[in-house]
Image: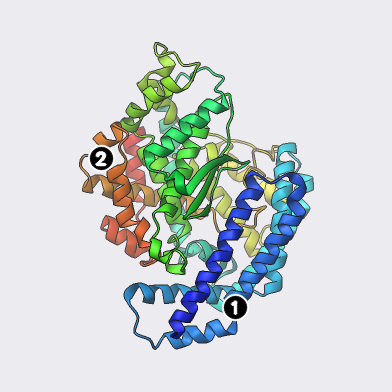
Amino acid sequence: MTPYDMQHKHFARLNDLYHVGAIAQWDEAAMMPTGGGDARGQALATLDGITHQMLTDPQLGEWLAAAETETLAPWQAANLREMHRSYRDATCVPESLVERRALANSRCEQAWRVHRTENNWQAMAPLLEEVVALAREEAAARSAVNGMSLYDSLLDSYEPGMTCAQLDPLFAELKAFLPGLLDAVIEEQAQHPAVPPEGPFPVEEQRALGLEMMRTLGFDFEHGRLDVSHHPFCGGVPSDVRITTRYETEGFTQALMGVIHETGHALYEQGLPAQWRSQPVGQALSTAMHESQSLLMEMQACRSREFLHFLTPHLQRCFSTASTGSTAWQEDNLYRLFTRVNRGYIRVYADEVSYPLHVILRYEIERDLIEGTLDVAGIPDAWDTRMQAYLGLSTAGNYRDGCLQDVHWPAGLFGYFPTYTLGAMSAAQLFAAARRSLPELPAQLAEGNFCALLGWLREQVHSQGKFLDYNALMQQATGSPLQSSWFRAHLEARYLAGG
């Protein structure tokens, strides 16, 4: 076997371990009894240690160097590039730190599920302090090798090549127009209020509706399933994708759109190049590209007037409390309901106009945390200050709906939040390109026909894996690198021009 063949086999074995870990993490979030937490955390920490050993094996470094002299096909060459990246990233961080971080993150995430419900910041803070300290330690280890700033070193793990120097101007553009747009949309919508349908909305009915919409979008149930968790997510592996949502009987829109959002993630996973799934090049391009796929389905396609035309009779049939003669269940009202813009506390419930402001708030805080200009004790005040400045709301003393609402920091996911808004901008640009390529797309969405859209995404995004970098993929699919102008045009057309 050639050096390339040896490392191909090595990464295939690694992928098998990642598979087991992904299912164990899904089970921890969706099915595991609370008493299993300590043992599961230890098991996952051990697994992380084993995979880290395999990724830092000196033999792998020798194979990588030797493979550079081989003549490789284009996909093999791209895979070798991603193997180098995986090896470089892993060798930055000592194995002892990997295991300590895994244990601390698991403890903190499990405690978060309890303390968020209790609004108990005092109990969470010491656990989060340990997580932040270890994240800073990892950032320092990566920075020493890659020469990036501390925060950039973590951001690069989710969005290769992205830096604060690129993010800050992009986010400054959004902060310059979003507050004014938010005010204008709220004022406009106040003249045409939406009438909320009356509940309750039984969980069984909501679940049935969610499953039906997953089928409509193209989800493959032979290779995935839907469950419930504290925080909606998409996990598992491409051959066995696990998505979750959470239900509230007082309303149905959040759970439904949560399912559609996670289905967008799942469709990306299910569409990755099958022949390369065991290899780094066969994985999703980046976290922002992943988010673009969920937001393209949830925001661009499924909150459109065309899709609401298709969805309305399904809603009327699904819920036992629905009355087809009621104003609340009419198509125009439902469209207003699904595109309602408000200032709210909860990021995952935010509309697409205010959502980027939630993300920018978190980005600025976690950047300062990792760079050491903010301590964990200062998070609640920093959160409240920015919440008032960006969204006109105060979270003083309300940790549950403030700095404890997300799982990301308790789980040690620093550098993740910016990718949500990068994904929103990418989704708008990709959907605009899809509409140019598919003139019949609006009519197809009105019929609940996603075949052409999914086929376009399969060709342009899903099947590409990591063969291209982000800007090259966007250039190939849309005709230009990522630009914020498409996102702004989409928001103004939908919310101010009646689109």
Q: Residue at x 24, y 34 (%)?
A: 443
Indicate whether 30 appears above or below 108.
above
Q: Nearer the viewer, residue 491 or 135?
A: 135
Q: Tag count in the figure?
A: 2
Q: Quadrant of the N terminus?
A: bottom left
Whether label 2 touches label 1, CB < 8 Å: no
**Residue extending furthest toward the left:** 439
> How many residues crowd around disc 2 within 10 Å: few (fewer than 14), some, or many (20 or more)?
many
Is residue 180 visible in the rendered structure shown here?
A: yes
Question: What residue is rendered at 58% in x and 75% in y?
Answer: 55
Taking the spot 78% from the left edge, 54% from the top edge, the residue there is 126
Mark 2 lies on residue: 441
Q: x and y percent of residue 76 in the render?
A: 38, 75
Residue 281: x and y in percent read: 42, 68
Q: Separation of disc 2 and disc 1 at Cα? A: 47 Å
Query: Which sits earlier in the primary sequence, circle 2 or circle 1?
Result: 1
Question: Coloured how?
Answer: rainbow
Say which residue label 1 marks: 56
The quadrant of the picture occupied by the C terminus is top left
Q: Secondary structure at mark 1?
A: loop
At numbered mark 2, what does the secondary structure look like: helix, strand or loop?
helix
* Residue 295: % across, % down: 42, 45
Judge whether 488 appears above or below 59 on screen.
above
Q: Is residue 128 visible?
A: no
Q: Residues within 10 Å of mark 1 (few under 14, many from 20)?
A: many
> Residue type at mark 1?
Thr
Identity, as a three-letter code, of the amino acid under mark 2: Leu
In the foreground, 11 or 331: 11
Coordinates of residue 185 in the picture (x, y in percent):
41, 31
Identified at 51% across, 28% down, the residue is: 206
Location of residue 289 (image quadrant) = bottom left
Looking at the image, the residue that sits furthest to the top is 325
